[in-house]
Image (cartoon, helix red, strand yellow):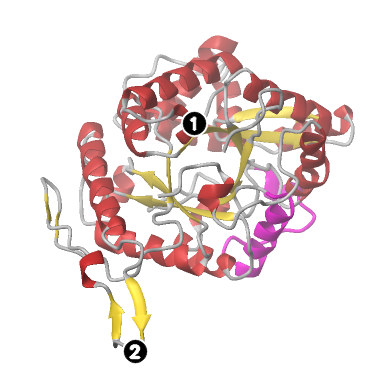
Amino acid sequence: MTRPSNSPRQMRLGLFVQPLGHHVSGWRLTQRLGSPTDIDWLISIAKKAEEGTFDMFFVGDALATNVHRLPSTMARLEPLTLLSAVAVNTRHIGLAATASTTFSDPFTLARSFSSLDHISRGRAAWNVVTSYSNDVARNFSKEDMPGHADRYAKATEFLQVTNKLWEGWQEGAVIANKDSGQYFVDDKINAIDHRGEHYQVQGPLNITRSPQGKPVIIEAGSSADGQKLAAQTAEVVFTASASLEEGQAFYRSQKQQVIEAGRHPDHLLILPGVMPIIGRTLEEAKETWRQLNLLVDIDNGIKQLSARFGLDMTQYPLDGPVPEIPAVEGNQSRVKLLTDLAERENLTLRELAAIAAGSRGHRVIVGTAQDIADDLQLWVEQEGADGFNIMPAIIPEQLDLFVELVIPELRKRGLFRESYQFSTLRENLGLPVV
């Protein structure tokens, strides 16, 4: 698909779902508190996002419980189970789930996502992650997490296997000819006979080719290994950038690597996470932001920083500078974002802890619908993003305001769709059909 040269760039929007709101204090300010394990609540959120013609309803996941994080990250529904229920209660919105290559099996995961694609009639997406916490390892009979490079090497082969399995069923493999008695065309169903360093998989997959051929592939790593893997295999990248300049630098780097990998740069969409704090007036938005931050537990924020940095931050003075953080083996991109932010803004440890706990390390925009639209438009027009992963601070209030105020403003400017045009997520994102 191409657009006229004089028309504005169309942005893509994902809803990053936290059933209790993305801000750590959000659940304390909502007038309608839901539950992260209430499927009716989650379906209502998905329906609101579909009303706003969001591209995707994205459910993150983790395989360990951390008591210092949001309540909804401590108790949550398994994402593919959740999205199967959402699929039969929606018709258009894409359904994206996180699943780890470090602690999953390629055959099982390929089958599960293909099943979701069938159930949703072509709306499935897989957010590929490698896991990084030793707490996760200890839930899977391991004492320590594999090294960063090893995890990405395994992820690369994992994706090779799942792609082979999805491609093993060709178009036209099912003919169901009652006269001849032939249901399948055997030559169009192929074993993969993969023999690699990490996996030995015969195949073929025991489910027919799905409506999209394969789910949309999302990745979120901003490290060198993460960018390399994304350039080769991803179709959407979730990232976090604190400033337009940072966003543009990442955008240029990632798109150039896509070109070097022999792919078209438009076939990988970059969607930074953004937390919009929306008010009908600027004063109202600022007051909402003030109330959210008043409720931040700094001790909780310090514990979050300690977990992210792999360093006990309680040994440093709260109102002193953020100490130098040694290289970590875990979530490198998010650590760099936080330390760069602290250096650029000359933040104290207390201030960084409040940001880490409140916004979870993503960029915050405070303002009216016009202010939010101005900011998003600037990033897309200045090639800092192809769209955004929206992270409402308070659910449902801030999501409602985004759908009811910001979406119409974006449509008025010609930046966002009026309605869904296609039946599959891949087509609605403007990605190649496979």
For residue 181, side relative to residue 417 (left or right) = left
Query: In front: 223, or 121?
Result: 121
Q: Is residue 62 above or below residue 241?
A: below
| Residue that lies at the very extreme toward the front in this rendered image | 179
Q: Is residue 90 above or below residue 219?
A: below
Query: In front: 234, or 247?
Result: 234
Find the magenta span and give its range. 25-53
Q: Amino acid at mark 2?
A: Asp
Residue, x 79% and y 26% (percent of image)?
A: 371
Where, by quadrant of the figure, is residue 232 drawn?
A: top left
Q: CA distance from mark 2 to mark 1?
A: 46 Å
Residue 5 on image: x %, y %: 66, 23
Q: Name the residue beneath numbered marker 2.
A: 179
Q: Name the residue beneath numbered marker 1.
A: 266
* Residue 172 painted magenta: no
Q: Is residue 125 above or below residue 341?
A: below
